[in-house]
Image: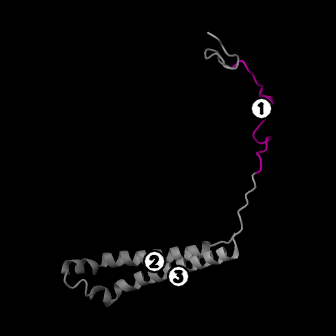
């Protein structure tokens, strides 16, 4: 059996290649190589497309949210011609629980739209 001097014997507690603690150095002393974090700047066209996209998203969220908050409490919600042939479904849709869930989703949708508008940052 040929033994390689680089591989230590598994029966020994330490490898034959010893390094003292002073030679290792602490992680604070050895600086990590600095990696520059540079993002490519957006062209003016892409920047405006991003701005318009965020504006449309906020507008869509706010509009849909306001509709979901107001519409369940209007007569159009319960007197819908699509629901007239189905009285059981109409009773479910006009229940306070379904109206409240719809209103809650509307409030959440408005919140998401305004949150996106507040968090928008340009690099």
Question: Which callout, 1 or 2, points to the residue nearer the camera?
Answer: 1
State left or right for residue 94 relative to residue 121: left
State left or right for residue 72 relative to residue 35: left
State left or right for residue 49 relative to residue 67: right
Q: Position of residue 44 (x, y in %)?
A: 70, 76
Mark 1 — residue? 24
Residue for point 75% across, 22% down: 18
Mark 2 — residue? 107
In the foreground, 56 or 24: 56
| Element assignment for label 1 | helix
- Furthest-top residue in this view: 1
Q: Quadrant of residue 65?
A: bottom left
**Image: magenta residue range:** 15-34
* Label 1 – label 2 distance at C-alpha: 58 Å
Question: Which callout, 3 or 2, points to the residue nearer the camera?
Answer: 3
Q: Quadrant of residue 75?
A: bottom left
Other-residue count near label 2 (Cα within 10 Å), few / some / many at <14 / 14–19 / ≥20: many
* Label 1 – label 3 distance at C-alpha: 58 Å
């Amino acid at each position: 059996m040929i033994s390689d001097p680089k591989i230590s014997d598994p029966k020994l507690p330490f490898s034959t290649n010893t390094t003292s603690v002073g030679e290792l150095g602490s992680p604070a002393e050895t600086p990590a190589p600095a990696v520059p974090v540079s993002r490519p700047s957006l062209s003016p066209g892409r920047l405006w497309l991003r701005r318009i996209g965020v504006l449309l998203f906020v507008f869509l969220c706010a509009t849909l949210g306001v509709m979901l908050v107001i519409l369940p409490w209007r007569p159009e919600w319960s007197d819908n011609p699509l629901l007239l042939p189905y009285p059981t479904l109409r009773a479910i849709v006009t229940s306070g629980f379904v109206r409240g869930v719809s209103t809650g989703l509307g409030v959440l949708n408005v919140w998401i739209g305004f949150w996106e508008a507040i968090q928008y940052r340009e690099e």
